[in-house]
Amino acid sequence: MKKIFQKAATLTTPLKNKITAYKTREKKPHPHVEKAVKIMNQFSVLFHALLACTLVFVIESLSRHSVFSAFAFIGKHTWAYLYNSFIVFASLSIVYLARRRVLTRIVISFFWLFLGLINGVVLSNRVTPFGFTDLKCISDLFAMQNTQYFTAKEATAVVIFVVIFLLFCICLFLYGPKFQGKMHRLYSLLLVIATASLLPLTTKAAQSSNVVDSYFSNIAQGYEDYGFIYGFSSSVVDRGMNQPRSYSEEHIHTIEAQVSSSISETPAAATTYADAETPNMIVILLESFIDPYEVDYLELSEDPIPNFRSLSENYSSGYLTVPVVGAGTSNTEFEVLTGMSMRYFGTGEYPHKTILKQTDCESIASDLSAIGYGTHVVHNNGGNFYSRANAFSMMGFDTFTSKECINIQEYTPLGSWPTDDILISETMKALDATPDQADLVYTITVQGHGNYPTEKILENPEILVTGAPTEEQNNQWEYYVNMIHEVDKFIANLTAELEARDEDTIVVMFGDHLPTMGLADENMASGSIFKTKYATWNNFDLPKRDADLAAYQLLADITDQLNIHTGTMFTYTQSRRNSQDYYDGLENLQYDLLYGKRFAYDGTDKYPATDLVMGIDEVSITRVWKTSDNKLCIYGENFTPWTKIFVNGEKVSTTFVSGTMLRISADQLENGDILTANIMGSGNTIFRSSNDYSYTKAETTPSNE
């Protein structure tokens, strides 16, 4: 054995010597590398300027999915392009603080390119560009895997790309060139500080000269006009709400006194409780819903929305000014439900994913709940999208029936989205869940959602559409118009169902934003791409009262018509909407409730978050049957395609067969194993659970079903 080890040592000695020689070798960079590094150090400022301009061009090409579009941006918005380049140039000044300058340049460049690449991927799947809110809520981003927004393959590609880059950086750190000159650290630090201090000055100058804008009503358009770097940077530094200059406890109490005084002067007494005469309220968000006749160049074979038009002509209706265009549904939703305005938030803000992650928020749900209403949400899309499950809890809703809790079987022709007709029965379930009280049901449709195909999909469309500038756009409009035509049928069927019920009910329906079709103000009959329409319906002869409203004023106006005067924001708008200081009070109250000391509540948590229940129907397992091929059929009630079986707390592969049957493998099952059926949201969130069912191998009787 000793001889064997000696022989092995003899054989490995040359290898050890080579490794030692490699480690102790004189490390000299390649002559070409050395020359390039010397030139970059000598002309570093000029090199950084050229690098910054190049990076911005590449980032814009990635974001716009076109080199030609990037050139068009530079030609049309040259100063905005140069300002974006200056932001990158300022970040590159950090290089002077490091001795490994090549590595530092690469890391900084990669940071900007990586953000631009993510934006390009995001914009290939949705209209809203990538902002800091997305980066902050990274868990939500990964929760959207295998959706229309973020696939598992894209997530895997991102991870692999980052790992490869990190390995490259490690190699460059170990073997890359280092700055050999004298490090003037104090001067370098002063240079970095001076460059950074120029950013707010140049930003203010750019905003005052209209090179860029300080507020993006349309986030997508803002990024398009002013560049990704500026748009993303704005979303980082301009978040939440700034404290109004006039904010104080005294001012808040003065506003409250004005509201109380105005309400007391109202001819009809304020409603403070839900009695037998209080109507159900159905609030419907119509995804991307507009009147196609409002688009100046479209020609239609027939009216695609006759039912909505009839409601507009016979019940209270009007234009609705919304905060977004083409995307950003949750921001219109936030305004409608809370009575608060998005105008006071920063660029790219989504309150659902920011402030509502940490604080509760008074809404129409909490206000009506306080006077006896049951409050529900129904939506045929994911419960975690826009962090809605959390947001609706923070807003005070009782239940939320998301797509995971619905046995959805029918989809749009593209297969992208569920059809909306299933929302009728789910809305009725919500009303029936609380038979002895009035209800608020907030129903969110999805059938009108983009993207819309440029190729012809519908072979025999019910509505023919022409007039768009190109054939591809005609195809898009034809698909969109026929989808909202189906939504219009949903409106008719829903109101017919409600008419048949012996309950006073009012329906309020509104478009959340225009579809993503590149529309401009001059294309719209309203004169603004920020205007959609709302319409109402009721079965108790409420007088017609038309009004053009902002989204945050909609439910204040409706509850005012119903003589319901409750809630901080809604009573404020009801009483002070026409006053000169309306917006000052709106901003102060909004800040007080979300970010301030809640003087309006005397410092208390008046409307705490609710323990939101997902879905209406109970999920249950009633019996099981093991097949001859060793599969276990699990029978029960209210299963959906998002229901998974857990065995002793561990999720197992589950096949959805029907609303009453699931199937799993019985290979590893033992007597006494506990089976549970869980309805799953994205990110392995458990929305609802069945009873625990104890498995027994003796249960092998074939089913009669």
Image (spheres, grey):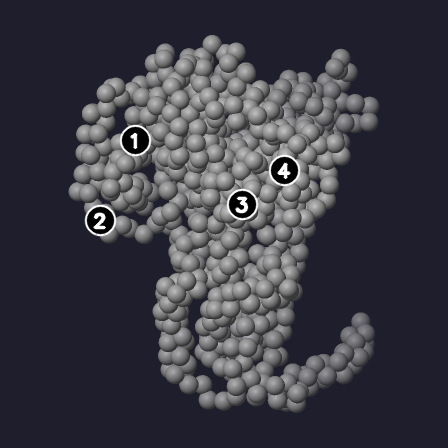
Q: Give the mark toward the camera: 4 or 2.
A: 4
User: Looking at this rendering, what residue extends furthest in the top direction?
Assistant: 502
Secondary structure type for disc 3: helix
Q: Which amino acid type is shown beneath numbered disc 1?
A: Gln
Q: Secondary structure at mark 1?
A: helix
- The residue indicated by pointer 1 is 574
Whole-number angstrom distance, CA of label 2 to CA of label 3: 40 Å
Answer few, some or many: residues within 10 Å of disc 2's Cα (few below 14, many 20 plus, some between 14 and 19): few
Question: Residue 662 location in percent, x, y?
Answer: 69, 26
Q: Which amino acid lies under the numbered mark 4 shown in the image of this protein?
A: Glu
Callout 2 amino acid: Ser
Residue behind mark 2: 246
Q: Residue at x 28, y 50 (%)?
A: 243
* Image x and y of residue 296, in percent: 56, 42
| Relative to 342, residue 203 above or below | below
Q: Earlier in the sequence, mark 4 or mark 3?
A: 4
Q: Quadrant of residue 322?
A: top left
Which one is nearer the viewer's eye here, 103 or 441? 441
Task: Decide: is 397 above or below 433.
Answer: below
Residue bearing mark 4: 299
Who comes first in sequence, dot 4 or dot 2? 2
